[in-house]
Amino acid sequence: MTKWLMGCVGLALAAGAPLWAAADEGIEAVTKPSADVTLAFVRPGRINEVRVKEGDAVKEGDILLRLEDEAEQIQLAQLKAQADDTIRIRAAEKQVLQKQEDLKKLEWAGKEGAATEWEIEHARLEVVIGDLSTDLAKFNQTQDRLKYDEAKAQLDRMRIISPISGKVEQLFLHKGESAEALAKVVRVVKTDILWADAPVPLVLARRLKVGGAAQVVFPETEGKAVEAKVIFMAGVADAASETLIVRVEVQNPGTRPAGERVRVRFPGTGDPAPAKKP
């Protein structure tokens, strides 16, 4: 009998369970969604649009709900018009060109004795002021663009956008209801890939590594296992049970519900049962 199997025997006997529960049957775990997010608005308001219902499939980036935003849309249009406006810049540039022409004429007149040095210096100063006015117009347009970007970001906060591809599990609020800031509005889960956290005996966990092969046996499958892989191993063991949480990931093309009790096996560590592809 190997040292690992002896360890499993000790654990199984200590827990009052038969040996096959620790070796052949695998380790009991409960599946959960590979992503589970509950979303909220970051500002209060009245819900104006609900684009999904419970059970709907959604993609990452889909807009799920929207607050009333008519006033914000009008303000955004005004700010966009200001940000795109180049009239002030073009007017300032034309004024500079005119002042430069005036300066050239005064400098010529000065050579002919028809203009004083004071007039020429004054014209030069007008050119400098014109250049500064052009720079100021460009600066103001940059500020208008930043104000537009800020208003657009604020408008985006009045929408709930799905950060994952998955399924709408629950709607907490509906059209016409008022939403408080950060209050639960919608829950989205990803179940086409499932996770299962298995409390693995330390003697077995030491043989495992992230990326290693695993198997999951679902209920009512007559012991047939589905291929899986280790995606996470806890850094701290449970001293009382001498176990370490090992998370496995398994494909779920048949969209079995999360929350089932399953058995997790680790091939090559005492469980030779073959696995099938999902």
Image (cartoon, rainbow, N blue to C red):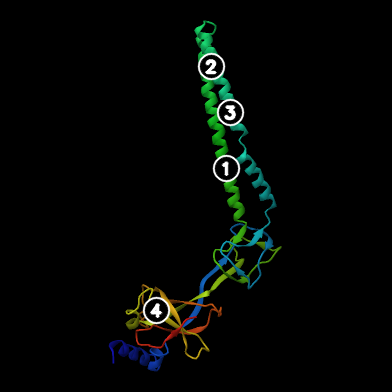
- Say few, some or many: other residues with alpha carbon within 10 Å of mark 1 (under 14 / 14 to 19 / 20 or more): some
The amino acid sitting under disc 4 is Ala
Q: Residue at x 28, y 88 (%)?
A: 3
The amino acid sitting under disc 1 is Arg
Q: CA distance from mark 2 to mark 1?
A: 34 Å
> Quadrant of the rendered structure where residue 144 is?
top right
Which of pointers 1 and 3 lies earlier in the amino acid sequence?
A: 3
Q: CA distance from mark 4 to mark 1?
A: 53 Å
| Rendering coords of residue 74 (x, y %) | 68, 47
72 shown above or below 250: above
Residue identifier under label 4: 213
Front tag of 2 and 1: 2
Which of pointers 3 and 2 lies earlier in the amino acid sequence?
A: 3
Asked whether 14 or 228 is in front, the reply is: 228
Which of pointers 2 and 1 lies earlier in the amino acid sequence?
A: 2
Q: Residue furthest top?
A: 113
> Quadrant of the rendered structure where residue 156 is?
bottom right
